[in-house]
Image (cartoon, rainbow, N blue to C red):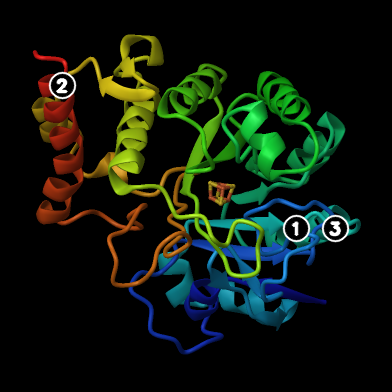
Amino acid sequence: MTIRCSLGTAKVLGLKRVKVDALPTTAYLMVGEHCRFNCAFCAQARNSGARADLLSRISWPKFEGQEILEGMAFPEAQSVLQRVCFQVVQDQVALEETKEWVKRVRDNSRLPICVSAGPRTIEEVEELLDLGVDHISIALDGATPEIYAQTKDGSWNERFTLLLDAAEKFPGHMATHLIVGLGESEEEMVNCLQTLYDRGITVALFAFTPVKGTRMEGIKPPEMPHYRRIQVAHDLIRQGLARADQFRFREGKVADFYLNIDELQNTRGGEPFQTSGCKGCNRPYYNETPGEELFNYPRLLTPNEVEVAWGYIKVEAKLMRTEEGV
Ligand code: SF4
């Protein structure tokens, strides 16, 4: 049985000799190919003309399953990896295949296992958890039903309800993915984040990434100041330092974070800007182009990177104060 893994994962498992700027601390494995859904941004979508070995902007070479399992046992891999995540492309057989893979990985490794974008019912969630899966991500991707309808098949409300029900039944085991830059306002994204954290759901933030061959290939990624504001809001909500209803918004943008920005920079440092999601998931270069400023840092930030990231927040806050005559 063959399976695809991200190029960075292949390097960690000793299966590819490639130069990478940051190693993944999660082994990302892709089950299934060519989804039956048609997300406008996804390389694996039904009508996508993108390369079959792409998911987001990274490539996923195929290997024999045994090679992957043996790779995970290497001491080098064990010293790097903190988790295994199955990215399930929703073809008809992918979930059944995922369950087989979960058993094989569980029998060969002690790493916690995640399954992303798999289940359609609460029973399927339960089946995966019973097999020993630690976190299950039901990807919302869009922050609102309207954004979802513009970019994805199916119903946001159905997914959202499944996610909330599963979070209530299996506390601490549910996660979701949200993509910043699909057309939602900052206020909509922040409110969605608050609702999810109130239910104990782990959120992984992504920056929209145009991929050639997809319906949204011509759309630009989010502006960095916009993404940084969402990251700060996300961090404050996740840490319980502030709530969405304490922020102030102007024309859909965060105008005030409720807390003093200089103090936040001192106390939170670079953490808001590191990759979010399940513990140990750093997704290097999932959204980024090497050599350009990173949306999600897969590692600790340097002092200069911390300064630059908070700089966006400060400049915008100053601008808003000036416009408001404060
Ligand atoms: S946050 Fe990371 S480890 Fe968790 S489901 Fe998403 S991609 Fe997988």
Q: Please identify the residue farthest to the bottom as the structure is shown.
A: 17
Q: Which disc is residue 323 wearing? A: 2
Q: Are marks 2 and 3 in contact (CB under 8 Å)?
A: no
**Earlier-in-chain disc, 2 versus 3:** 3
Crowd tier of the residue under label 1, counting other residues whose Cα lies within 10 Å: few below 14, some 14–19, many 20 or above: many
Q: Is residue 293 left or right of residue 59?
A: left
Helix, strand or loop at mark 2: helix
Depth check: 38 or 205 in front?
A: 38
CB atoms at circles 1 and 3 under 8 Å apart? yes
Find residue 160 and report its image quarter. Answer: top right
Separation of marks 1 and 2 at Cα, in angstroms: 46 Å
- Residue type for callout 1: Val
Residue 117 image point, x, y percent:
70, 47
Residue positioned 53% across, 76% down in the render: 7
Most distant residue in the top direction: 245
Q: Secondary structure at mark 3?
A: loop
Rendered position, 66 above or below 274? below
What amino acid type should be assigned to the residue bearing mark 3?
Asp
The residue to which callout 3 is attached is 91
Of the numbered discs 1 and 2, the one sitting upstream in the chain is 1
Q: Secondary structure at mark 1?
A: loop
Q: Which mark is residue 89?
A: 1
Structural crowding at the residue carrying mark 3, measured as other residues with C-alpha within 10 Å and reported as few (<14), some (14–19) or many (≥20): some
- Is residue 275 found left or right of 189 in the rendered image? left
Decide if residue 270 is on the left or right side of residue 274.
left
Report the mark closest to the observer, 1 or 2.
2
What amino acid type is highlighted by mark number 2? Answer: Glu
